[in-house]
Image: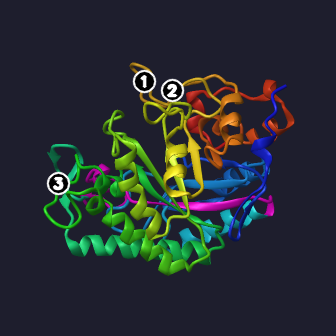
Amino acid sequence: MSDNSALFTPFTLGKLELPNRIVMAPMTRNMSPDNVPHEQVVDYYRRHAAGGTGLILTEGTCINHIAASGYPGVPYFWGEERLEGWKRVAEAVHKEGGKIAPQLWHVGGVRRAGTPPEGDVPGYAPSGMGVPGKVRCHIMTQEDIDDVVRAYAEGARDAKACGFDAIELHGAHGYLIDQFFWEATNQRDDHYAGSMDNRGRFACEIIAACRDAVGPDFPIALRWSQWKQQDYTARLAPTPQLLEQFLTPLSEAGVDIFHCSQRRFWEPEFEGSELNLAGWTKKITGKPTITVGSVGLNADFIPAPGETSFREAETASLDDLVARLEAGEFDLVAVGRAMLANADWANKVREGDNEGLVPFRKEMLGVLN
Protein backbone atom coordinates (compact mmCIF):
# COMPACT_ATOMS: atom_id res chain seq x y z
CA MET A 1 0.00 0.00 0.00
CA SER A 2 1.31 3.45 -0.92
CA ASP A 3 2.36 5.80 1.86
CA ASN A 4 0.11 8.87 1.59
CA SER A 5 0.94 10.19 5.05
CA ALA A 6 2.36 13.46 3.66
CA LEU A 7 -1.17 14.42 2.65
CA PHE A 8 -2.22 14.18 6.29
CA THR A 9 0.34 16.43 7.93
CA PRO A 10 -1.01 19.69 9.42
CA PHE A 11 -0.62 23.01 7.61
CA THR A 12 -0.53 26.37 9.35
CA LEU A 13 -0.57 29.84 7.85
CA GLY A 14 -1.00 32.46 10.55
CA LYS A 15 -4.34 31.75 12.20
CA LEU A 16 -5.37 29.27 9.49
CA GLU A 17 -4.68 25.81 10.88
CA LEU A 18 -5.58 22.83 8.70
CA PRO A 19 -5.48 19.20 9.82
CA ASN A 20 -4.20 18.01 6.43
CA ARG A 21 -3.10 19.17 2.98
CA ILE A 22 -6.30 18.26 1.13
CA VAL A 23 -8.44 21.02 -0.38
CA MET A 24 -11.82 20.74 -2.07
CA ALA A 25 -11.46 22.52 -5.39
CA PRO A 26 -14.11 25.13 -6.30
CA MET A 27 -16.64 23.60 -8.70
CA THR A 28 -19.69 25.35 -10.12
CA ARG A 29 -22.83 23.30 -9.37
CA ASN A 30 -25.72 25.55 -10.60
CA MET A 31 -27.94 24.27 -7.79
CA SER A 32 -28.80 27.40 -5.82
CA PRO A 33 -32.32 28.54 -6.78
CA ASP A 34 -32.77 32.31 -6.38
CA ASN A 35 -28.97 32.42 -6.01
CA VAL A 36 -29.32 31.37 -2.36
CA PRO A 37 -27.29 28.47 -0.88
CA HIS A 38 -30.19 26.43 0.52
CA GLU A 39 -30.06 23.51 2.95
CA GLN A 40 -29.07 21.03 0.23
CA VAL A 41 -25.99 23.16 -0.43
CA VAL A 42 -25.27 23.42 3.30
CA ASP A 43 -25.38 19.64 3.60
CA TYR A 44 -23.21 19.20 0.48
CA TYR A 45 -20.36 21.14 2.03
CA ARG A 46 -20.93 19.56 5.43
CA ARG A 47 -20.51 16.09 3.94
CA HIS A 48 -17.21 17.03 2.35
CA ALA A 49 -15.93 18.37 5.67
CA ALA A 50 -17.11 15.20 7.40
CA GLY A 51 -15.30 13.26 4.68
CA GLY A 52 -11.98 14.54 5.94
CA THR A 53 -11.30 17.53 3.67
CA GLY A 54 -9.02 20.00 5.42
CA LEU A 55 -10.00 23.16 3.51
CA ILE A 56 -13.09 23.64 1.38
CA LEU A 57 -13.07 26.24 -1.38
CA THR A 58 -16.65 26.91 -2.34
CA GLU A 59 -18.00 27.02 -5.84
CA GLY A 60 -17.66 30.43 -7.42
CA THR A 61 -20.03 32.83 -5.64
CA CYS A 62 -20.84 36.13 -7.32
CA ILE A 63 -19.92 39.49 -5.84
CA ASN A 64 -22.35 42.40 -5.61
CA HIS A 65 -22.09 43.75 -9.14
CA ILE A 66 -24.85 43.81 -11.74
CA ALA A 67 -22.87 41.76 -14.29
CA ALA A 68 -20.98 39.39 -11.99
CA SER A 69 -23.01 36.28 -12.87
CA GLY A 70 -22.98 34.40 -16.14
CA TYR A 71 -24.75 31.17 -15.28
CA PRO A 72 -28.18 30.26 -13.85
CA GLY A 73 -28.47 28.84 -10.37
CA VAL A 74 -25.12 30.00 -9.04
CA PRO A 75 -25.02 31.34 -5.47
CA TYR A 76 -24.38 35.01 -4.76
CA PHE A 77 -22.31 36.46 -1.94
CA TRP A 78 -24.42 39.47 -1.09
CA GLY A 79 -27.91 40.13 0.25
CA GLU A 80 -29.28 39.15 3.65
CA GLU A 81 -30.85 35.79 2.70
CA ARG A 82 -27.83 34.70 0.68
CA LEU A 83 -25.35 35.60 3.39
CA GLU A 84 -27.49 33.82 5.98
CA GLY A 85 -27.24 30.74 3.79
CA TRP A 86 -23.47 31.07 3.64
CA LYS A 87 -23.29 31.50 7.42
CA ARG A 88 -25.07 28.14 7.76
CA VAL A 89 -22.58 26.60 5.33
CA ALA A 90 -19.60 27.86 7.34
CA GLU A 91 -21.13 26.73 10.63
CA ALA A 92 -21.87 23.25 9.27
CA VAL A 93 -18.32 22.84 7.98
CA HIS A 94 -16.84 24.00 11.28
CA LYS A 95 -18.97 21.54 13.24
CA GLU A 96 -17.34 18.75 11.25
CA GLY A 97 -13.85 20.09 11.97
CA GLY A 98 -13.20 21.60 8.55
CA LYS A 99 -12.19 25.05 7.35
CA ILE A 100 -13.82 26.92 4.46
CA ALA A 101 -13.26 29.89 2.15
CA PRO A 102 -15.70 31.34 -0.39
CA GLN A 103 -14.41 31.82 -3.92
CA LEU A 104 -15.40 35.36 -4.88
CA TRP A 105 -16.22 35.56 -8.59
CA HIS A 106 -17.04 37.91 -11.45
CA VAL A 107 -17.39 36.25 -14.86
CA GLY A 108 -16.70 39.42 -16.86
CA GLY A 109 -17.15 39.11 -20.61
CA VAL A 110 -18.20 35.46 -20.34
CA ARG A 111 -21.66 36.68 -19.35
CA ARG A 112 -24.26 36.80 -22.10
CA ALA A 113 -27.19 39.22 -21.97
CA GLY A 114 -30.35 37.40 -20.95
CA THR A 115 -28.80 35.31 -18.18
CA PRO A 116 -31.22 35.39 -15.23
CA PRO A 117 -31.95 37.03 -12.95
CA GLU A 118 -30.26 40.18 -14.33
CA GLY A 119 -31.71 39.68 -17.81
CA ASP A 120 -30.50 42.05 -20.51
CA VAL A 121 -27.41 43.25 -18.62
CA PRO A 122 -24.42 42.59 -20.91
CA GLY A 123 -21.09 41.16 -19.93
CA TYR A 124 -18.52 43.64 -18.60
CA ALA A 125 -14.96 43.25 -19.85
CA PRO A 126 -11.75 45.29 -20.03
CA SER A 127 -12.06 45.71 -23.80
CA GLY A 128 -15.57 44.41 -24.39
CA MET A 129 -14.29 40.95 -25.30
CA GLY A 130 -15.23 37.65 -23.72
CA VAL A 131 -13.38 35.94 -26.56
CA PRO A 132 -10.28 37.48 -28.19
CA GLY A 133 -11.19 39.64 -31.19
CA LYS A 134 -14.96 39.67 -30.61
CA VAL A 135 -16.19 42.92 -29.07
CA ARG A 136 -19.74 42.19 -27.90
CA CYS A 137 -19.70 43.34 -24.25
CA HIS A 138 -19.70 46.55 -22.29
CA ILE A 139 -16.21 48.11 -22.22
CA MET A 140 -15.46 48.89 -18.60
CA THR A 141 -14.95 52.52 -17.60
CA GLN A 142 -12.85 53.62 -14.65
CA GLU A 143 -16.07 53.97 -12.67
CA ASP A 144 -16.97 50.36 -13.51
CA ILE A 145 -13.54 49.20 -12.40
CA ASP A 146 -13.83 51.08 -9.12
CA ASP A 147 -17.31 49.58 -8.54
CA VAL A 148 -16.02 46.04 -9.04
CA VAL A 149 -13.05 46.62 -6.73
CA ARG A 150 -15.45 47.85 -4.04
CA ALA A 151 -17.69 44.83 -4.59
CA TYR A 152 -14.80 42.42 -4.07
CA ALA A 153 -13.84 44.24 -0.87
CA GLU A 154 -17.46 44.07 0.31
CA GLY A 155 -17.45 40.32 -0.32
CA ALA A 156 -14.21 39.88 1.60
CA ARG A 157 -15.56 41.84 4.57
CA ASP A 158 -18.79 39.84 4.57
CA ALA A 159 -16.88 36.54 4.36
CA LYS A 160 -15.01 37.37 7.52
CA ALA A 161 -18.23 38.52 9.23
CA CYS A 162 -19.98 35.28 8.21
CA GLY A 163 -17.32 33.22 9.95
CA PHE A 164 -15.29 31.99 7.00
CA ASP A 165 -11.63 31.17 7.49
CA ALA A 166 -10.22 32.82 4.34
CA ILE A 167 -11.27 34.00 0.89
CA GLU A 168 -10.23 33.02 -2.60
CA LEU A 169 -10.32 35.43 -5.53
CA HIS A 170 -11.11 33.78 -8.88
CA GLY A 171 -8.43 35.13 -11.20
CA ALA A 172 -8.31 32.17 -13.60
CA HIS A 173 -9.91 30.48 -16.61
CA GLY A 174 -10.75 33.55 -18.67
CA TYR A 175 -13.11 35.28 -16.20
CA LEU A 176 -12.95 39.00 -15.38
CA ILE A 177 -9.70 39.29 -13.43
CA ASP A 178 -8.05 36.95 -15.93
CA GLN A 179 -9.43 38.99 -18.84
CA PHE A 180 -7.36 41.88 -17.52
CA PHE A 181 -4.31 39.61 -17.12
CA TRP A 182 -4.60 38.21 -20.65
CA GLU A 183 -3.31 40.49 -23.39
CA ALA A 184 -5.62 38.87 -25.94
CA THR A 185 -8.70 40.21 -24.11
CA ASN A 186 -7.12 43.34 -22.65
CA GLN A 187 -6.58 45.81 -25.46
CA ARG A 188 -7.23 48.95 -23.42
CA ASP A 189 -5.20 52.12 -23.96
CA ASP A 190 -4.89 53.15 -20.32
CA HIS A 191 -2.82 52.14 -17.28
CA TYR A 192 -4.63 48.78 -16.98
CA ALA A 193 -3.13 47.44 -20.21
CA GLY A 194 0.13 46.96 -22.03
CA SER A 195 2.91 45.81 -19.72
CA MET A 196 2.65 42.83 -17.36
CA ASP A 197 2.52 45.25 -14.42
CA ASN A 198 -0.32 47.23 -15.98
CA ARG A 199 -2.37 44.14 -16.82
CA GLY A 200 -2.03 43.02 -13.21
CA ARG A 201 -3.03 46.41 -11.79
CA PHE A 202 -6.77 45.58 -11.58
CA ALA A 203 -6.05 42.41 -9.59
CA CYS A 204 -3.63 44.25 -7.32
CA GLU A 205 -6.26 46.89 -6.58
CA ILE A 206 -8.76 44.15 -5.71
CA ILE A 207 -6.26 42.34 -3.48
CA ALA A 208 -5.30 45.56 -1.68
CA ALA A 209 -8.94 46.54 -1.16
CA CYS A 210 -9.75 43.08 0.21
CA ARG A 211 -6.76 43.28 2.53
CA ASP A 212 -7.98 46.60 3.86
CA ALA A 213 -11.42 45.06 4.40
CA VAL A 214 -10.27 41.97 6.34
CA GLY A 215 -7.11 43.12 8.10
CA PRO A 216 -3.59 41.70 8.08
CA ASP A 217 -4.27 38.22 9.50
CA PHE A 218 -7.11 36.94 7.30
CA PRO A 219 -5.78 34.74 4.47
CA ILE A 220 -6.35 35.77 0.86
CA ALA A 221 -5.87 33.15 -1.85
CA LEU A 222 -5.72 33.86 -5.57
CA ARG A 223 -6.59 31.22 -8.14
CA TRP A 224 -4.85 31.77 -11.45
CA SER A 225 -4.12 29.78 -14.58
CA GLN A 226 -2.14 29.93 -17.77
CA TRP A 227 -4.95 28.24 -19.77
CA LYS A 228 -8.30 29.86 -20.50
CA GLN A 229 -11.67 28.33 -21.27
CA GLN A 230 -11.49 30.39 -24.45
CA ASP A 231 -8.07 28.92 -25.34
CA TYR A 232 -6.61 25.90 -23.55
CA THR A 233 -3.17 26.63 -25.03
CA ALA A 234 -2.96 30.24 -23.77
CA ARG A 235 -0.01 31.22 -21.60
CA LEU A 236 0.15 34.43 -19.61
CA ALA A 237 3.82 33.88 -18.82
CA PRO A 238 5.70 31.63 -21.27
CA THR A 239 9.05 32.00 -19.46
CA PRO A 240 10.17 31.96 -15.81
CA GLN A 241 11.25 35.59 -16.15
CA LEU A 242 7.80 36.69 -17.29
CA LEU A 243 6.22 34.57 -14.59
CA GLU A 244 8.23 36.46 -11.99
CA GLN A 245 7.09 39.77 -13.49
CA PHE A 246 3.50 38.55 -13.28
CA LEU A 247 3.55 37.10 -9.77
CA THR A 248 5.69 39.56 -7.81
CA PRO A 249 3.22 42.49 -7.76
CA LEU A 250 0.36 40.15 -6.81
CA SER A 251 2.37 38.71 -3.96
CA GLU A 252 3.36 42.16 -2.76
CA ALA A 253 -0.25 43.37 -2.97
CA GLY A 254 -1.24 40.83 -0.31
CA VAL A 255 -1.83 37.33 -1.71
CA ASP A 256 -1.10 34.73 0.99
CA ILE A 257 -1.74 31.56 -1.03
CA PHE A 258 -1.53 31.01 -4.79
CA HIS A 259 -3.91 28.39 -6.19
CA CYS A 260 -2.29 27.35 -9.46
CA SER A 261 -4.73 25.77 -11.89
CA GLN A 262 -3.43 23.20 -14.34
CA ARG A 263 -5.38 20.64 -16.33
CA ARG A 264 -2.83 17.96 -15.33
CA PHE A 265 -0.79 18.63 -12.18
CA TRP A 266 2.05 16.33 -13.26
CA GLU A 267 3.06 18.40 -16.30
CA PRO A 268 6.23 20.53 -16.03
CA GLU A 269 5.61 24.23 -16.56
CA PHE A 270 8.87 25.06 -18.34
CA GLU A 271 11.51 23.08 -20.19
CA GLY A 272 14.52 22.09 -18.14
CA SER A 273 12.64 21.66 -14.87
CA GLU A 274 10.16 19.12 -13.50
CA LEU A 275 8.42 21.78 -11.40
CA ASN A 276 4.74 22.23 -12.17
CA LEU A 277 2.93 25.59 -12.11
CA ALA A 278 2.48 25.54 -8.33
CA GLY A 279 6.14 24.60 -7.92
CA TRP A 280 7.36 27.53 -9.99
CA THR A 281 4.95 29.89 -8.25
CA LYS A 282 6.24 28.85 -4.83
CA LYS A 283 9.86 29.11 -5.99
CA ILE A 284 9.34 32.67 -7.24
CA THR A 285 7.12 34.11 -4.51
CA GLY A 286 8.06 32.04 -1.47
CA LYS A 287 4.32 31.88 -0.69
CA PRO A 288 2.39 28.67 -0.06
CA THR A 289 0.79 27.18 -3.16
CA ILE A 290 -2.07 24.83 -3.99
CA THR A 291 -1.66 22.42 -6.89
CA VAL A 292 -4.67 21.12 -8.81
CA GLY A 293 -5.41 19.27 -12.01
CA SER A 294 -6.81 15.75 -12.38
CA VAL A 295 -5.65 14.70 -8.91
CA GLY A 296 -6.57 11.07 -8.30
CA LEU A 297 -7.81 10.56 -11.86
CA ASN A 298 -6.27 9.35 -15.12
CA ALA A 299 -7.61 12.04 -17.50
CA ASP A 300 -8.20 15.78 -17.47
CA PHE A 301 -11.64 17.38 -17.58
CA ILE A 302 -11.68 18.44 -21.26
CA PRO A 303 -14.87 16.97 -22.77
CA ALA A 304 -14.48 14.03 -25.10
CA PRO A 305 -15.32 14.62 -28.80
CA GLY A 306 -19.04 15.18 -29.16
CA GLU A 307 -19.50 15.75 -25.41
CA THR A 308 -20.11 18.97 -23.45
CA SER A 309 -19.73 17.83 -19.83
CA PHE A 310 -16.51 17.07 -17.97
CA ARG A 311 -14.64 14.02 -19.22
CA GLU A 312 -15.18 10.81 -17.28
CA ALA A 313 -12.08 9.37 -15.62
CA GLU A 314 -10.88 6.36 -13.67
CA THR A 315 -9.08 6.47 -10.35
CA ALA A 316 -5.29 6.81 -10.52
CA SER A 317 -2.19 6.50 -8.33
CA LEU A 318 -1.23 9.32 -5.99
CA ASP A 319 2.45 8.31 -5.80
CA ASP A 320 3.79 11.13 -8.01
CA LEU A 321 1.62 13.71 -6.26
CA VAL A 322 2.79 12.62 -2.82
CA ALA A 323 6.45 12.56 -3.90
CA ARG A 324 6.16 16.16 -5.12
CA LEU A 325 4.44 17.22 -1.89
CA GLU A 326 7.14 15.53 0.20
CA ALA A 327 9.78 17.37 -1.85
CA GLY A 328 8.17 20.71 -0.98
CA GLU A 329 7.16 21.54 -4.55
CA PHE A 330 3.79 22.79 -3.27
CA ASP A 331 1.96 22.88 0.04
CA LEU A 332 -1.66 21.91 -0.56
CA VAL A 333 -3.51 19.71 -3.02
CA ALA A 334 -6.93 20.59 -4.46
CA VAL A 335 -9.18 17.73 -5.55
CA GLY A 336 -12.06 18.28 -7.96
CA ARG A 337 -13.90 15.58 -9.90
CA ALA A 338 -12.54 12.79 -7.69
CA MET A 339 -14.19 14.52 -4.74
CA LEU A 340 -17.48 14.90 -6.60
CA ALA A 341 -17.38 11.13 -6.90
CA ASN A 342 -16.24 10.62 -3.31
CA ALA A 343 -17.29 13.13 -0.65
CA ASP A 344 -15.15 11.08 1.75
CA TRP A 345 -12.15 11.01 -0.61
CA ALA A 346 -9.77 12.25 2.10
CA ASN A 347 -10.88 9.64 4.63
CA LYS A 348 -10.63 6.83 2.11
CA VAL A 349 -7.15 7.88 1.04
CA ARG A 350 -6.02 8.16 4.65
CA GLU A 351 -7.35 4.68 5.38
CA GLY A 352 -5.74 3.23 2.24
CA ASP A 353 -9.16 2.23 0.90
CA ASN A 354 -8.25 2.55 -2.78
CA GLU A 355 -10.79 -0.11 -3.73
CA GLY A 356 -13.52 2.01 -2.18
CA LEU A 357 -12.79 5.04 -4.37
CA VAL A 358 -15.39 5.53 -7.08
CA PRO A 359 -14.37 6.77 -10.57
CA PHE A 360 -15.84 10.03 -11.88
CA ARG A 361 -18.89 9.75 -14.11
CA LYS A 362 -20.59 12.68 -15.84
CA GLU A 363 -24.00 12.01 -14.26
CA MET A 364 -22.41 13.00 -10.93
CA LEU A 365 -22.56 16.60 -12.09
CA GLY A 366 -26.35 16.45 -11.82
CA VAL A 367 -26.48 15.79 -8.08
CA LEU A 368 -24.99 17.33 -4.94
CA ASN A 369 -22.99 14.43 -3.48
Residue shown at 62% from the left, 34% from the top = 295
Question: Mark 3 or 1 closer to N-term?
Answer: 3
Bounds of the magenta segment: 95-124
Q: Nearer the viewer, mark 3 or mark 1?
A: 3
Report helix, strand or loop for mark 1.
loop
The amino acid type, in three-letter code, at marker 1 is Glu
Instruction: Tell me the residue that label 3 is attached to.
Output: 187
Left or right: residue 69 compared with residue 53: left
> Mark 1 — residue?
307
Name the residue: 28% across, 56% down. Answer: 196
Residue 368 falls inside the magenta stretch: no
At label 3, the amino acid type is Gln
Using the numbered discs, state the Cα–Cα distance from disc 3 to disc 2 in whole angstroms: 33 Å
- List the residue tagged with mark 2: 311
SS class, disc 3:
loop
Q: As rendered, which of 68 and 127 lies closer to the eye?
A: 127
Measure how far apart labels 3 and 1 are at the Cα level: 33 Å
**The quarter of the displayed image where residue 256 is located:** bottom right
- Neighbours of disc 1 within 10 Å: few (<14), some (14-19), many (20+): few
Residue 137: x and y in percent read: 20, 55
Colour scheme employed for the rendering of this structure? rainbow
